[in-house]
Image (cartoon, grey):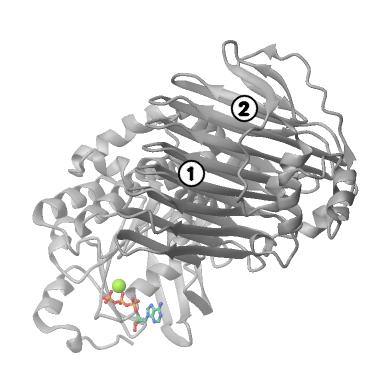
Amino acid sequence: MKPIELANKSLTDAATLLGVDSTSPALERLLAIGLPSKKSEEYRYFQVEKLLEETYNTLEYVPHSIEEGEKIVIVDGIVTHAPKNMRVYYDQCQAMDMTHFDPMYYLGHLLSPHVIKIDLDGDTDVEVEHHYTKSNALINYRIVLSNQANRHATLFESFHADNIRDTLVLYGYDVFVSPDSTLRMLKNQKMDENGYAMIASHRLKLNQHANAVLKSFDVGSGMGLQLFKAELDTYAYIDAGHLLYLNKEAQRGTVSKIIHRGEHSTSQQEAKNILDGHTRGIFDALIKVEHSAKYTKAHQNSKAILLNEEAYMASKPQLEIYIDELEASHGSTTGQLDPKQLFYLRSRGIRETEARKMLVIAFANTLIEQVKDHRQQEVIKALFDEAYYGNEQ
Amino acid sequence: MKTLEIENVHANIGEKEILRGLNLALEPGKVHAIMGPNGAGKSTLSKTIVGHYDVEVTEGDIRYKGKSILDMEPEERALEGIFLSFQHPVEIPGVNNAYFLRMAVNAKRKHEGKEELNAAEFLREMKKYLEMLGMKADMISRSLNEGFSGGEKKRNEILQMLMLQPDVIILDEIDSGLDIDALRAVSEGINMMKDGKRSFLVITHYSRILDYIKPDYIHVLKEGRIIKTAGSELVAQLEEEGYESIEEEA
Ligand SMILES: Nc1ncnc2c1ncn2[C@@H]1O[C@H](COP(=O)(O)OP(=O)(O)OP(=O)(O)O)[C@@H](O)[C@H]1O
Ligand SMILES: [Mg+2]
């Protein structure tokens, strides 16, 4: 299939093309918003058309029985392994967000009538490994994730692909964070040029007194955009952090809308971006505080270091505020490595490549060190090294 | 053989010529003190020796152990044994002090074909000096120089010198901002490094440190040149009469 063919189609034609019912509300939404293009707000920095114009092989999704394993393993959109006693199953998505900003959220849902449901019971840590093995394929799947009230759960996500080319992955979460609970989602993703491109479209709903911690560590090259919408109920709290280390021709980043609906809700969002090569980093993030969200706190910040003259950071932190009773800040800076610091390290016998890496890591460390799980922290650092030194050759 | 020979060096910072035909030779095992008015070019000289990017050498040569170093990268000069204690050490938030120092020590060991030190060996080695320098243990676990007081930064420079064991040691105003105890500790560290082979270049405005580190030569640097070289008796004259009284030697 060629996703671009959905553009400007009538409801019935699009329904035929996708093999879905023409009365589907998701299809109506998709056509109302329209496929993403350079003209859409959310995709203005990301060359999405290039991806949608390709022809992809579509895959058959035949769920097979899930084997017992230490982690949740999803291969080309199909769950193959899950820990014993963990509820991982296929179901219809009953609670789609009908006001999401992202058309790809709806396309994803239309292409994946059955979603992977993960119910996190109790205090749990779980790893989710995504594997991609098919070239020229459109891999699409969606996950519905929920946790239990009063519980703390953590999800570590990683992505793996070997020797594939020109695949497009559409995936995303619908996340329901229960009252008085904490859900931490940590993602690390090293991508290569030409392997697979990704558009990940998420939706998070934070109930009263719910806490969500979202950390993404995106390194390497390739095309990847994560888009998320998060809604905060009374006393809900979200802490979002995004690290980008990009090289070669990468175009990657985050587009987000965090919406404060309930009083006393808190959001903080921090982006650290290190751009090498001919790359484009994206941090296009809106925090919206609605009338109903008095006594809100909202802080947002983006910092970028450009290691190459050809690199470009599209950094757009934005606050949209409809009330007076709140505490809010936002800021954005872009700069280079400090030559004085670099010289100091070199004057002690540390090679320039190494000295640069030390400074780059120092810049990234505030985010990396927030990962309290020591092993995961090591994984992130190793991935970073791989991307960093891979680029040196 | 001289350890370091600076021959007719002219050097610019930006458009401005700061060093104007400077000659100086450091002898093995000797302490050379450099004194001179503010803005004379003392720090520029030290930056020139270590290959700082601010400085452009337009004429002359610098030889270390007989070889010109002007084309060498700063890290190569360091690995070969040239060390500068900066007048204003830079703060580097996010780079752990101990980690940095171990990287530096191991880079040097590797360069010399020695085994690298593991974390435990490194700590053992470093502990010897921490106490001597009166450095609190937390200073080594903090970010490099971040939030260090002036005196703490200088002690940290001396710690690096002791760990790296360089052959040419340039100390740019190591004594400024030090209290009496710190001055004594730092001087003790420097004196420990004297082995009859290493050369020292001590840039200072005050005679006090020279009571601890006995200089063999005093050089007066003025307007980008060494205008006089004498024994330690010159210090008293300078203190008394200032730099105005010094005439350039023929
Ligand atoms: N980065 C720079 N840009 C412009 N001028 C500079 C720079 N660094 C030094 N200079 C100038 O070069 C001259 C020599 O400076 P230098 O720091 O070498 O003096 P100094 O002898 O070390 O003085 P002090 O005793 O005050 O430390 C001064 O006039 C100074 O203003
Ligand atoms: Mg100076």
Residue at label 2?
A: A128
Most foreground residue, A142 or B62: A142
Subunit that carries the residue with mark 1: B
Kindly indicate whether the residues beneath marks 2 and 1 are on one polypeptide chain: no
Q: Which residue is drawn at 22% across and 59% down?
A: B150
Q: Which residue is drawn at 51% across and 66% down?
A: A334
Identify which amino acid the numbered label 1 is placed on. Lys
The nearer-to-camera label among 2 and 1 is 2
Residue A14, percent across and down? 86, 49
Residue at label 1?
A: B108
Subunit that carries the residue with mark 2: A
Is B72 situated above or below A261? below
Q: Is B172 situated left or right of A192 in this image?
A: left
Q: Residue at x 46, y 61 (%)?
A: A343
What kind of element bears circle 2?
strand
Most foreground residue, A145 or A153: A145
Tell me if mark 2 has few (under 14), some (14-19) or many (20+) residues whose alpha carbon lies within 10 angstroms of its own.
some
Most foreground residue, A362 or A34: A34
Separation of marks 2 and 1 at Cα, in angstroms: 42 Å
Q: Does the residue labelled 2 lie within 8 Å of ligand 1?
A: no
Q: Is A240 situated left or right of B163 in this image?
A: right
For the question of whether residue B116 can be seen, the reply is no
Quadrant of the picture in which ligand 1 is shown: bottom left
Q: Is A50 situated left or right of A221 in this image?
A: right
Identify which amino acid the numbered label 2 is placed on. Val
